[in-house]
Amino acid sequence: MNNAKQFTDEVFSYTNEGFEQIIYFHNKATGLKGITCIHDTRLGPSCGGTRLYNYASEEEALYDVTRLAKGMTYKNAAAGLDIGGCKTVLIGDPEKVKSEEYFRSYGRYIQSLKGRIYTGQDMNITLKDCEYMDKETDYVSGVLRKGAGSTTILTAYGTYVGMLAAVKEKYGQDNLDGLTIAFQGAGAVVQEMVQYLKKHDLKRIYFTDVKEEKIEKFKELLPLANFVEPDEIYEKNADIFSPNAIGAVINDETIPRLKADIIAGAANNVLEEEEKHGKMLEERGILYAPDFVINAGGVINVYTEMTGYHEPSAIQTTEGIYDRLLEIFKISSQEKIPTYKAANIMAERRINRLIEMRQDTVDSRQRFQWNIE
């Protein structure tokens, strides 16, 4: 009983940190089990992907979903979108639990929230999975009938232009020529990015993954890429270290091993502890492109669906990641703070400006009504 109370207290403690809602849900018939965290809806309905992962415990899943939901609020604000942040984690083995009824039951759950959240692809969730969800809910994005399809395409493009921004800041060059990149993870995003990498005269590419099918696919796309074992990727002589798999990979153990000048990738929450490890990177002179800014292409894709899909607008907004990162690097330099903190400040300033603007509008209307009366 004491353990149950301690866990309940931990869940409710998030409301004191600004989280709006945490929902546990379960469908016995399909085996669906998960947690939704809504962090902030002050700018609009919350938006964030769904990931499926075989968490060791509910506590571990809660820790992940809250970090991810807060990150989505900042990501959406920094991308210039008028939506808040949320995340859902489904607890289970992706190789065992997936089925049409599993995802349709999840879609029915999403529909029950009546537009409070919009969701789409994340780790281990495919376009096909989203198509099943779409049969039961109006609030899933990244499906073909709505015009955009997979979020992978713009996530990859945004990560690529973000790399270019980081290279511009660090080396003063406008391309990737002569550089070496070490990719941690060779999944769909990195595979999609290959078409852009081929435009440059790269010196070398290292990559790693734990799934054989992804390794073989990447070798097929880039035959000259060099596969290394997962634990070796940190120590490769690379200009750019690109994390594109799980989070928290930049930590006490890995930072001393890094030989790269730039960290730029599509993974979420790559700093295990933002304050501590962001500062460590700065002290070592490693330029960090904040993950929630560089990987925002996917949510930009989703937002464009929510407002009426227009591909040129989605591409143009994604290309804006380049300028947003340069602005973050400028704030970091001027205010002498790590880039992760500069990104947070940029997002917070936008949220606060819009809230104040909306409040001023309401107050003006109230004053105007009062004067008439």
Image (cartoon, grey):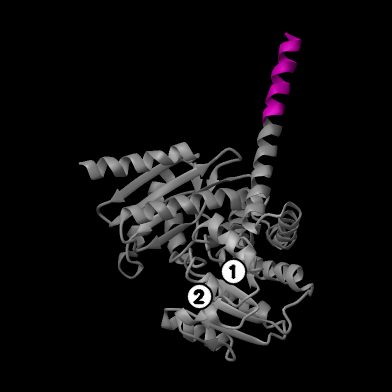
At 43% from the left edge and 66% from the top edge, which residue is drawn? 124
Query: Does residue 237 appear left or right of residue 3 in this picture?
Result: right
Q: In this view, does 14 lie above or below 33?
A: above
- Asked whether the residues under the numbered discs 1 and 2 touch, taking CB atoms below 8 Å apart as contact, a structural biologist would say yes
The residue that mark 2 highlights is: 185
Extreme left residue here? 1
Q: What stretch is highlighted in magenta?
A: 359-373
At 55% from the left edge and 42% from the top edge, which residue is drawn? 45
Helix, strand or loop for disc 2: loop
Query: Does residue 89 appear left or right of residue 371 in this picture?
Result: left
Whether residue 81 can be seen here: no
Q: In which quarter of the image is the C terminus?
A: top right
Query: Does residue 317 appear left or right of residue 26 in this picture?
Result: right
Residue type of the residue flagged with mark 1 = Gly
Assess whether residue 45 is covered by the magenta stretch.
Answer: no
Assess whether residue 368 is covered by the magenta stretch.
Answer: yes
Extreme bottom residue here? 224
For label 2, the crowd category at 10 Å Cα-Cα, with few meaning under 14, some 14 to 19 and many 20 or more, is many
The residue that mark 1 highlights is: 265
